[in-house]
Image (spheres, helix red, strand yellow):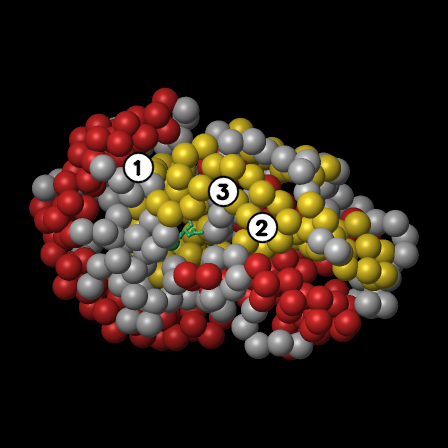
Amino acid sequence: MKITDIRLGMLRVPLKTPFKTALRTVNQIEDVVVIIETDTGHRGYGEAPATAVITGDIHGSIIEAIRTVIKPKLLGQDIADLNHILRLIQGCIMKNYSAKAAVEIAVYDLFAQYYQAPLYKMLGGGVPRLTTDITISVDYIDKMVADSLDAVANGFETLKVKVGKDIGVDIERVKAIYNAVAGKALIRLDANQGWTAKEAVYALHKLEDAGVRLELVEQPVKYYDLEGLKYITERVHTPVMADESSFGPREVIELIKMRAADIINIKLMKTGGISNAIKIADICSFYDMQCMIGCMLESSISVAAAVHVAVAKADVITKIDLDGPSLCAVNPVSCSVSFNGPDITIGDAPGLGVTAIEGLEMLA
Ligand SMILES: C[C@H](N)C(=O)N[C@H](CCC(=O)O)C(=O)O
Ligand SMILES: [Mg+2]
C-alpha cells in the first residue's frame, strides 16, 4: 500500500454554544482535513485545528507545512514501513505539531486498515469504551451554573470548568457550580494560564478550606512558568495538571524531573501526533504518573484517533477530555467511533473507519 497523493480540505462545524476560555472565544470548529490516497484505493484521514494561542499553528502554516514539506517526503512511501514514515514526518520540519499530527493520524489510519484492524488493536488493544467530561465555558456565574446543570442532566459526570479570568470571580464561579452539582458530578478546573502562581495557591486554598472538592486544576500559570507550576504543586492538595507547559516527551521528562506537576495532559495537536503521545504515556507509566488525554476544538476525525490512543493506553491515561464532538451542533463525520453524550465507543471497522465527511470543502 503506497502513498500516491495527499489532499487537503477544510471542515467547518458550528458549536452548540460559544467556547470561552481565558485565552479565546470560538464559535465554530474550522479544521484542516488531510486525506492520504494510496495505490490500493484505501484512504487515510487526519485532522488539525489551528490553535494559534496554544500551538502557534494557523491554517496557512498547517496547509503549507503539509503541502511543501511533509507531502514531498511521503509520496511513494509504503504504509507498512510505519516507523520510517513517522521518522520522516517528525524529522522533516521543526515544530508544526498540528500539521504533523494530522498527517500521522491519517498514516496510522492506513496502517491499521492495511492490517484490517481497528487502530486501538494495532496500538496494543484494550476495552473499546470511554467516558468523557464536558467543558463548561467561562462566563457569568449564573450561566455557568445553568450550563453545568444542563450537562449533568445530559449524563455528564465530570465537568471541566474553565476559569482564569479574575481570581475573585473565579472562586465564586467554582463555589456556585460545586454547590449546584456536588454529589452528581466531579469538577476539574482549567485556568488556561490565567492565574499567577500566588493567585492559584490563594484560590485553591480558599476552595479547599470551603470544602470544595476538586479533581484537579489544569494549567494555572503561563506555559513557560515551570517554577510557578512547581510552587503550586508543592502547596495545594488539589492535583495540578500540565497542559500548555507540556508538548512532547522532552517537556514531560523535564516536568517529571522537576516534580512540577502531578498529571500530564496529552493532546495529539501538541505532541505532533500518535507516536509521541504513546511515548509520553509510556514515560508517565514508567514514573507512575497519570495522564489525561485532551483535544483542541476538533471534530470526530482527530478526536477518534485520540480515543483509540486512550483505549490502548488506559493503564496510564485515566482521565478523558475528548468532548470536541459533544460541543458541536452537528456531527458531520461518519466513523467507527460513536460519541453519545459522555459515552464513547469504538466499532470493529479497520483503522478509524471514516466513511463520510459532510460539508468538507476540498482545497485546490
Ligand atoms: C475542548 C477541550 N475540552 C479543551 O478544553 N481544550 C482546551 C483548549 C481548547 C482550545 O482552545 O482549542 C484546553 O484543554 O486547554
Ligand atoms: Mg487545558
Which one is in front, 252 or 103?
A: 103
In which quadrant is the C terminus drawn?
bottom right
User: In the orientation shown, which residue stands out farthest toward the top?
Assistant: 153
In which quadrant is the N terminus drawn?
bottom right
Mark 2 surroundings within 10 Å by alpha-carbon count, few (fewer than 14), some (14 through 19), many (20 or more):
many
Q: Amino acid at mark 2?
A: Asp
Residue at x 39% of width, y 42% of height: 19
Residue 107 visible in the picture: yes
Establish if 338 lies above or below 245: above
Tag nearer the camera, 1 or 2: 2
Residue labelled 1 has its Cβ within 8 Å of some atom of ligand 1:
no
Q: Which mark is residue 28?
A: 3
Q: Is residue 201 left or right of residue 38?
A: left
In the rendered image, residue 88, in percent from the top left (x then y), is placed at 70, 74
Q: Amino acid at mark 3?
A: Gln
Q: Amino acid at mark 1?
A: Leu
Q: Give the Cα separation between the discs numbered 3 and 1.
A: 27 Å
In the rendered image, residue 306, in percent from the top left (x then y), is placed at 56, 50
At numbered mark 3, what does the secondary structure look like: helix, strand or loop?
strand
Q: Which residue is mark 2?
A: 31
First-in-chain label (1 vs 2): 2
User: In the orientation shown, which residue stands out farthest toward the right?
Assistant: 40
Establish if 307 lies above or below 152: below
Residue at x 28% of width, y 27% of height: 146
Which one is in front, 1 or 99?
A: 99
In the rendered image, residue 130, in percent from the top left (x then y), is placed at 52, 38
Q: Which residue is mark 1?
A: 186
Residue at x 36% of width, y 22% of height: 153
Establish if 154 lies above or below 33: above
